[in-house]
């Protein structure tokens, strides 16, 4: 049975699950967060490694018994506290009441995420796709519309399944003073190079204050929610 405190909604429509699988982007290491009873990766066991993360103990025990004779790893923990050790593909039906924390988690772990496959409420579509950081780190590959009838229990609004791919940005975030000197010693710098350099350094500054305050700093011109 679902629990309201976890804001649980389960995707139950088999046809739409198969449609998602046909477009799903996976890698050698795949992590499904908030997997639920009938998880999406259940239909794609040809991959080398699969990790299922479920906070609900009843669902965790169900998954553990279901896959005890397979190589699937099942973990009972809070998804946003899980440490991603290897470059992975993420699949997640994000709980509606914890959307902001999950988005921040995906942004902070961008170096370890190669593909991001997430389900979100429809009304948050533009706020995520047009977000400053998502544009910089992730490229949108596919959108799949999910009616509220596809879920149990039925949510109040429709959803979207979004598939992102990690971008290969030219300049990494650095702190070194030598890097600053060498960068500006170049004889010719085009506008694009300067733009990405400033953006990466600005991102570093935000991460620094976020680490100190343990809060996500949002300015008026960078609002997400």
Image (cartoon, rainbow, N blue to C red):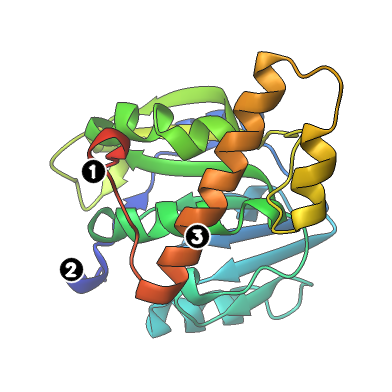
User: How far is disc 2 from disc 1 in space, using C-alphas?
Assistant: 22 Å
Q: Secondary structure at mark 2?
A: helix
Q: Is residue 157 above or below residue 181?
A: above
Of tags 3 and 2, the one toward the viewer is: 3
Q: Which residue is mark 2?
A: 4
Q: Secondary structure at mark 1?
A: loop
Q: In what quadrant of the picture does the C terminus appear?
A: top left
- The quadrant holding residue 181 is top right
Q: Which residue is mark 3?
A: 207
Q: Is residue 52 above or below residue 107?
A: below
Q: Which residue is mark 1?
A: 225
Q: Residue at x 27, y 32 (%)?
A: 122
Of tags 1 and 3, the one toward the viewer is: 3
Disc 1 + disc 3, Cβ < 8 Å = no
Disc 2 + disc 1, Cβ < 8 Å = no
Q: Residue at x 78, y 64 (%)?
A: 86
- The quadrant holding residue 190 is top right
User: How far is disc 1 from disc 3 in space, using C-alphas?
Assistant: 18 Å
């Amino acid at each position: 049975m679902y629990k309201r405190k976890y804001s649980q909604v389960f995707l139950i429509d088999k046809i739409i699950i198969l449609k998602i699988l046909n477009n799903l982007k996976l890698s050698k290491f795949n992590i499904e967060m908030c997997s639920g009873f009938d998880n999406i990766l259940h239909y794609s066991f040809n991959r080398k490694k699969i990790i299922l993360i479920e906070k609900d103990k009843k669902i965790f025990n169900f998954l553990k018994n279901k896959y005890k004779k397979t190589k699937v790893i099942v973990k009972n923990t809070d998804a946003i506290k899980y440490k991603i050790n290897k470059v992975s593909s993420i699949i997640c039906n994000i709980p509606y009441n914890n959307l902001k924390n999950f988005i921040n988690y995906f942004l902070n772990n961008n170096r370890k995420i190669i593909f991001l496959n997430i389900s979100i409420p429809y009304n948050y579509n533009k706020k995520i796709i047009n977000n400053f950081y998502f544009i910089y780190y992730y490229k949108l590959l596919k959108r799949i519309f999910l009616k509220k009838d596809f879920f149990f229990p039925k949510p109040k609004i429709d959803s979207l399944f979004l598939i992102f791919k990690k971008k290969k940005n030219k300049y990494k975030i650095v702190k070194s003073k030598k890097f600053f000197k060498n960068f500006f010693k170049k004889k010719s710098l085009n506008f694009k190079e300067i733009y990405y350099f400033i953006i990466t350094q600005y991102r570093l500054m935000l991460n620094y204050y976020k680490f100190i305050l343990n809060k996500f700093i949002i300015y008026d011109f960078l609002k997400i929610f």
